[in-house]
Amino acid sequence: MKHRYENFGGIVAIDDPPFLAFVDRDFMRELGLEDSPLWKDQDEAINILSAPTEVHLAITNACKVGCKHCYMDSGELDRHEMDTERLKEALHKLQSIGVFHVALGGGEALLRPDLFEIAHYAREIGLVPNLTISGHMLTKETAKKLRVFGQVNLSVDGVGKAGSVFREPRMFDLADKAITMLVDAGVKTGINCVLGRNNFESMPELFEYAKDKKTNEIEFLRIKPVGRAKELYDKERTTYEQNINLIPLLSKYSKKYDIEAKIDCSFIPMLCYHKPPPEYLEKTSTYGCEAGNVLIGAKSDGRINGCSFLPPTEMTIFDFHDQWYSSPYFKDLRSWPSRAKEPCRSCRYLEVCKGGCHAVALHVTGSMDEPDPDCPMVVEYSDRRGNHDVGK
């Protein structure tokens, strides 16, 4: 078991089964841990963490696939990409500040000949590496080596025609073969599905497929207007009707096919629309935008951003923690609720949701300070005010 102290108590993590929990001071004491100087503070609320728990690290921008919805705009190798030793230094830095997980991706991470050296190094220093790939280039031999990762996710946006909404048809066949190789090799395998308007109705087929392939879970990712996906967003963004139906449908299919369904943080407004108890969301660490707090993103050249979908900053993976509490960039991200406009300001989920996806707001409205225009509650508020175009 690994742990990290926080003002409210701490964070504990185990690898098998994968588990990470925010616990109070008494629980930390029950584990036999000594009191922390952080506990001298009377405030036991979960506020700004001492460091992110997870970093989404693109270890290369190189990719031969060219998916039209790629938020990284991957293709050519970044000439400033970190080499093996520099990347190890970056991982060591993250471990030293208490990061638990690193989600490695790209680009196509398998294009890096040092991928397994990097992954094994992460394990050696106490980081859990996870990986997302397209299935391109995978062989049976490589699949066995991928056991070093906590989980490997394959990018699959649907079955049949739905699988080629964003990707070339051949990519489904490659991903399908890759899933078989990974499951046969004993690798914990999941599916990442980018959900848009034109593959939304195909969810039941994807659940059935995931069950047949013996995958661990499906994570549904909202299409973001970043990178090449900017050109697709207006016609591919999920509709108001789809957004209000998403959570009930995921619950239905998850139970029917016995496959765990997850959503990324940008879909939290759609969850909140169905009025779950806020205290339950807080206890289960269900949150919306935690960019620059629970997580950060990092480019292959080391520059960081609040999350992978926000513009990169000049801070790097090596120095961002020195500015963790002082940087205006981080302060602006974390203080969004204090600047929230209606209907977010009056929403009971403000502190959980934090305004939805700020990358979407930035693209659609030109400002990250605006509420997520696709949140169903924002759409309904706009309709009442006579603006019928928002989120439709």
Image: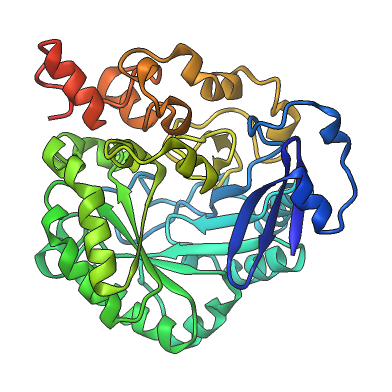
> Is the C terminus in the top left, top right, bottom left or bottom right quadrant?
top left
Q: Is residue 58 above or below residue 203?
A: above
Instruction: Give the x, y percent position of residue 234.
Output: 16, 34
Q: Horizontally, is 308 left or right of 148 in the view?
A: left
Q: Horizontally, is 218 left or right of 378 in the view?
A: right
Residue pictured at 40% horizontal, 73% vertical? 216
Residue pictured at 32% horizontal, 17% vertical? 366
Instruction: Give the x, y percent position of residue 117.
Output: 66, 70
Q: Horizontally, is 142 left or right of 14 in the view?
A: left
Residue 163 visible within the image:
no
Task: Report which quarter residue 371 is drawn in.
Answer: top left
Nearest the eye: 135 or 198: 198
Task: Report which quarter residue 349 is drawn in.
Answer: top left
Instruction: Give the x, y percent position of residue 115.
Output: 58, 67
Q: How is the image coloured?
A: rainbow
Residue 366 visible within the image:
yes
